[in-house]
Image (cartoon, rainbow, N blue to C red):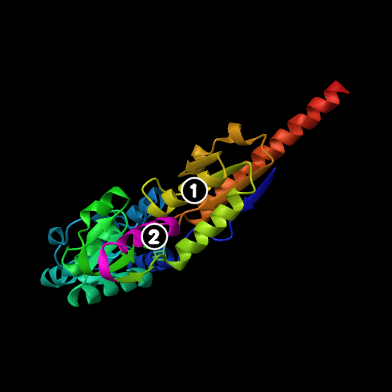
Amino acid sequence: MEIIVADHSGFCFGVKEAINKTFHAASEIKDKKIYTFGPLIHNSQVIEQLKTLGIESIDSVEQKPHSTIIVRSHGVPFSFYETAENHHIQLIDATCPFVRKVQNIAREYYLKGYSVVIVGDPKHPEVIGINGWCDNRAYIVQNEQALDTVPDCEKICVVAQTTITEELWDYITKELEHKAQILEKFNTICIATKDRQTSCAKVASQVDAMIVIGGRHSSNTQKLVQISKKYCENTYHIETVEELPINQLINMKKIGITAGASTPDWIIKEVINKMSNADQHNNEMMNMMEEIEN
Ligand code: F3S
């Protein structure tokens, strides 16, 4: 069995930064309770690890005045900062710089009088956050149907949730050309997402089965699964090594692996080790059978 790991897989720059800031805060701040605003990343194993350090997730600043709150890489709405200040909260801001860029564009063009369109998932915290930088007045377009909610406008500024596919971006922005006299397009899909999607497609197109490791709620992992399925029908999405469908994989020759931006390296290693061990065991059994037959 040959195992090919995609060049770009696992923790992205923004997630690494958020995790480093959180562990640093845990070691430095002893006099106050630390919370994250929403789960720090979409990975239940890491969330459990944080709980052992006493760091829990909350969804309302008002609940915890005078505490320390970590803003995760997805970012938060503009008004969040004022609310935090009013409640005497010490903020540790781990908003990814790529997300901050989208927030700034949305705000700048909203204040210039543009209608703002965000191509992305309306329920995703990153998109909710970006919308909060233009007074929650953005049109959020996740698919073809949602395009109908965007009226004809004089000026539209369109940005992307950082983890969508280029394919969705191209399709939606092309359609928006019919709806605006002036269309300012900012393809804000982040470089880490592009790299992960490109290397996922490259590996998926040359293997018999593909394993995508990542949280079920992780947007970028779901996109990797979609892309992988296009090139490899035997695509399996797993969160942990326990979910590895070893019986389906054992007789395959080439297996590809990729992982979402919030998947720690140690989970990727566990998956590789389990497959290698199963392969070795399988080979030993085959050799034994051959010897018996001869
Ligand atoms: Fe940032 Fe891109 Fe990761 S926006 S959090 S580097 S997926």
Sequence-wise, the earlier of marks 2 and 1 is: 2
Quadrant location, the C terminus = top right
Q: Position of residue 98 (x, y in %)?
A: 37, 70
Q: Residue furthest left?
A: 86
Left or right: where 263 falls relative to 36: right
Residue drawn where x is 27% and y is 74% of the image: 104
Above-or-below relation of 257 to 199: above
Q: Position of residue 125 (x, y in %)?
A: 27, 57
Residue drawn where x is 14% and y is 58% of the image: 63
Residue 135 visible within the image? yes
In the rendered structure, which segment of residues is drawn in magenta? 165-182
**SS of the residue at dot 1?**
strand
Residue drawn where x is 43% and y is 57% of the image: 165
Q: Main secondary structure of the magenta part?
A: helix
Is 169 covered by the magenta stretch?
A: yes
Is 97 covered by the magenta stretch?
A: no
Residue under pointer 2: 169
Q: Nearer the viewer, residue 265 or 137?
A: 137
Residue under pointer 1: 213
Q: Look at label 1 and name its amino acid.
A: Ile
